[in-house]
Amino acid sequence: MKPSKEKLYDALGELIYAVAKADGLVQESETSKLQEILQQHTWASQVQWSFEYEKTHETSLDDAYAKALDTCKEYGPAPEYAHLFDILYQIAQASNGLDAKEARVMVQLKLELTEHFMNLDL
């Protein structure tokens, strides 16, 4: 069964958290940038809640990433993914520029989603 839109938004928050956590610590500049970016989106509160939940619980990057990736794969293609990658890049840039570990998480996510969706029988 396809996850709800709210579950997808939770996954987006988890993925944003995973990129922010990739360099070892979620920086205040990343949190502030996320709040600034999300003011432009109707789904902001759900994504922000999920990001803060993972941050508060100090979820590991791998756990947040894996859970969110599974949700995205189950949900299927969504227009929100285009916004997600833009947000991920902006978050990564917010603290001392794009770190190699952050870039690796973003590239891995894009590759895994692309591969998964290309193999679907739509």
Image (cartoon, rainbow, N blue to C red):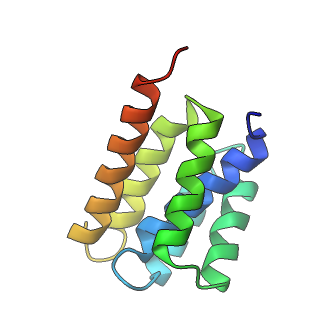
Instruction: Give the left or right position of residue 38, taking residue 49 as reference.
Output: left
In the rendered image of this protein, does residue 98 appear above or below residue 70?
A: below
In the rendered image of this protein, does residue 99 appear above or below residue 44?
A: below
Instruction: Give the left or right position of residue 57, taking residue 95 as reference.
Output: right
Instruction: Give the left or right position of residue 116, taking residue 108 as reference.
Output: right
Q: For this rendering, which residue is in front, 15 or 35?
A: 15
Looking at this view, name the residue that lies furthest to the top: 122
Query: Which residue occupies 74% across, 49% down?
Result: 7
Query: Which residue occupies 42% across, 56% down?
Result: 88
Q: Locate residue 14, reporting x and y percent.
A: 58, 62
Query: Which residue occupies 37% across, 69% down?
Result: 94
Q: For this rendering, which residue is in front, 36 or 103?
A: 103
What is the quadrant of the N terminus in the image?
Answer: top right
In the rendered image of this protein, does residue 61 appear above or below residue 90?
A: below
Q: Locate residue 27, reporting x and y percent.
A: 45, 82
> Is residue 73 visible to us here?
yes
Q: Locate residue 119, reporting x and y percent.
A: 42, 24
Q: Locate residue 49, reporting x and y percent.
A: 73, 66
What is the quadrant of the C terminus in the image?
Answer: top right
Number of numbered discs visible in the structure rendering: 0
> Is residue 99 visible to us here?
no
Instruction: Give the left or right position of residue 32, taking residue 11 as reference.
Output: left
Query: Which residue occupies 27% across, 60% down?
Result: 103
Looking at this view, name the residue that lies furthest to the left: 100
